[in-house]
Image (cartoon, helix red, strand yellow):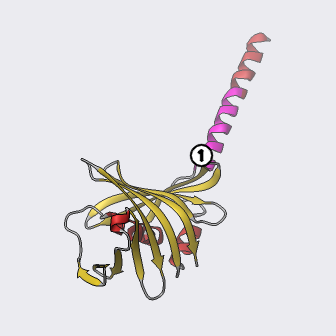
Amino acid sequence: MIACLNYDLGCAMKVLVLGIFCLLLVSCRTGGGDDSPKLHDFYRELSAADMLVQIRADFGDRTAEYRVRYSLSLDEERVTIVEPVELAEISVLVLEGGTRLEFDGLVLETGALPGTGLSPLEAIPFTVRTWRDGHITAQGEETLDGVRVVRAVHTSTYDGQSLQVVTWFDTETLHPLRSETYVDGTAVLILTFLTVTLG
């Protein structure tokens, strides 16, 4: 009788553990999940945006921080430096095939940057394009600073370099809260979205 009871308890424990494991798999979806089309569609249909973003760029031997304003409209896509103040009002107009740097009424054609790394001022346009066109390889819900979020992992390429972009979106609005870009497992860019208006 005791042996039979032990056997039944053992089976019950196995079933319970298996059930918990299955629930964890469902709650931590990978391969895109059911909300992947929602994210892609939301950002593919995006026609206007205004964001104030804190950027932390890791160059390997040093790091730099910027605060920028990103604006998107039907006419143009632009990034303007807010901080550091000595660079304030320098503006990058994002064009097909390159960028154009504007400051003090002067215009300097910069073209595509050499190498495989993103410049900090190209980080936000690249990230928005990744949300539109990148492939979601993993997705799940979690909490970030007390806010319920969708954590999405996108893969994308820039100048032939494979990049991974991890972004935390507010589950209610799908607005971004934080995004990290990785090269070979190292975070080279961290974006913190301070204010976001999308249309």
Query: Vertically, is 113 above or below 183?
Result: below
- Place of residue 159 in the rendered image (x, y in percent of width and height, measured from the top left): 26, 67
Quarter containing the N terminus? top right
Left or right of residue 142: residue 128: left
> What is the x, y in percent for residue 117?
26, 61
Q: Residue at x 30, y 66 (%)?
A: 158
Q: Quadrant of residue 164?
A: bottom left
Residue 27 magenta: yes
Quarter occupied by the C terminus: bottom right
Q: Quadrant of residue 174?
A: bottom right
Is 72 on the left or on the right of 174, as rendered?
Answer: left
Task: Give the quarter of the image for residue 191.
Answer: bottom left
Q: Secondary structure at mark 1?
A: helix
The stretch drawn in magenta includes residue 90 = no
User: Which residue sits at x=53%, y=61%?
Assistant: 194
Q: Position of residue 137 (x, y in %)?
A: 46, 57
Which residue is at 32% across, 82% downward?
A: 96
Give the amino acid type for the residue marked by disc 1 in the picture.
Leu
Front in this rendered view, residue 32 or 87: 87
Residue 88 drawn at (x, y percent): 37, 69
Q: Nearer the viewer, residue 112 or 182?
A: 112
Q: In this figure, which residue is indicated by the disc labeled 1?
A: 25
Mark 1 crowd level (few <14, some 14–19, many ≥20, 10 Å Cα)? few
Q: Which residue is most to the bottom?
A: 75
Q: Total number of numbered labels?
A: 1
Give the prevailing secondary structure in the magenta stretch. Answer: helix
Q: Which residues are magenta?
A: 13-28
